[in-house]
Image (cartoon, coloured by chain):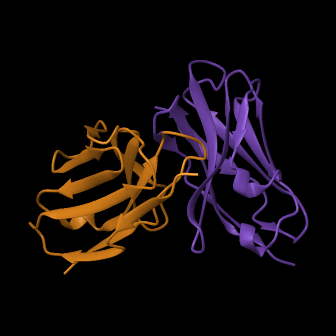
Amino acid sequence: DIQMTQSPSSLSASVGDRVTITCRASQSINTFLNWYQQKPGKAPKLLMYAASRLQSGVPSRFSGSGSGTEFTLTITSLQPDDCATYYCQQSYSSPYSFGRGTKLDLK
Amino acid sequence: QVQLQESGPRLVKPSQTLSLTCNVAGGSISSGAYYWSWVRQSAGTGLEWIGRINNRGETSYNPSLKGRVAISADTAQNQFSLKLTSVTAADTAVYFCARALGPSPFDFWGQGTLVTVSS
């Protein structure tokens, strides 16, 4: 099975900050890497897919990069609405695994 | 716009079977190359993919559930279901149903339902 490791597990930042979250896969997953945002009591919401493709309707301040085993999600100018937990997920092979999440809040 | 909604008992006794149904609106589960999945979330294990079914009725499951899981579809009712047998407290979680297109990500999710395993 492919293990997904996210860092950091939590992060505090200020409005307007640039924020970067890292996700590492235990083996190469090409670009089959997706990012989700989850707020309390809600289902995860797809932000990015195929490592760098922005899901329709997601603000352009979100971007993703990487391939193989190392990936990043970047928020270029943090907004209050971005406070949430972010998860990476690999869709390369079954079982489709998730990272343990990065909780982002405002400083 | 596809909408998914989970339903089923919120409380299940240990050793019994957890049964949930996901009703799909705004799209047919029997058309296209979509996969219909169950995902659960608990504080202990985080987000865990349980398994999926496609429009041909082909299923795939997470080996971590050790043969306790079965997913089926009812195309007439446009819904798919999850059965998890021999449950323990470790199966207490929020259960989500979700849609994916082939190897693509989960683009539509249900709101989730908390199932508690307790006597």
Quarter holding residue B114:
bottom right
What residue occupies the far top of the structure in this picture?
B31
Look at 8% across and 66% down and name the residue there.
Answer: A16
Pick whichever, B91 or B110, lies toward us.
Answer: B91
B78 w.r.t. A4: above or below? above
What residue occupies the far bottom of the structure in this picture?
A107
Query: In the figure, what tint was chain B given?
Result: purple
Query: In the figure, what tint was chain A given?
Result: orange
A77 w.r.t. A69: above or below? below
Side of B51 where B15 appears, left or right: right
* Residue B3 image position (x, y, % from top left): 54, 38
Pick whichever, B37 or A51, lies toward us.
Answer: A51
Quarter of the figure that contains the C terminus of chain B: bottom right
| Number of numbered tags placed on the structure image | 0
Quarter holding residue A28:
top left
What residue occupies the far left of the structure in this picture?
A16
Quarter holding residue A99:
bottom left
B100 w.r.t. B30: above or below? below
* Residue B110 image position (x, y, % from top left): 56, 48
Pick whichever, B4 or B43, lies toward us.
Answer: B43
Look at 71% across and 21% down and name the residue there.
Answer: B56
Pick whichever, B118 or B25, lies toward us.
Answer: B118
What residue occupies the far right of the structure in this picture?
B15
Side of A66 where B53 appears, left or right: right
Look at 21% across and 62% down and name the residue there.
Answer: A20
Look at 36% across and 74% down and name the residue there.
Answer: A9
* Residue B64 image position (x, y, % from top left): 71, 57
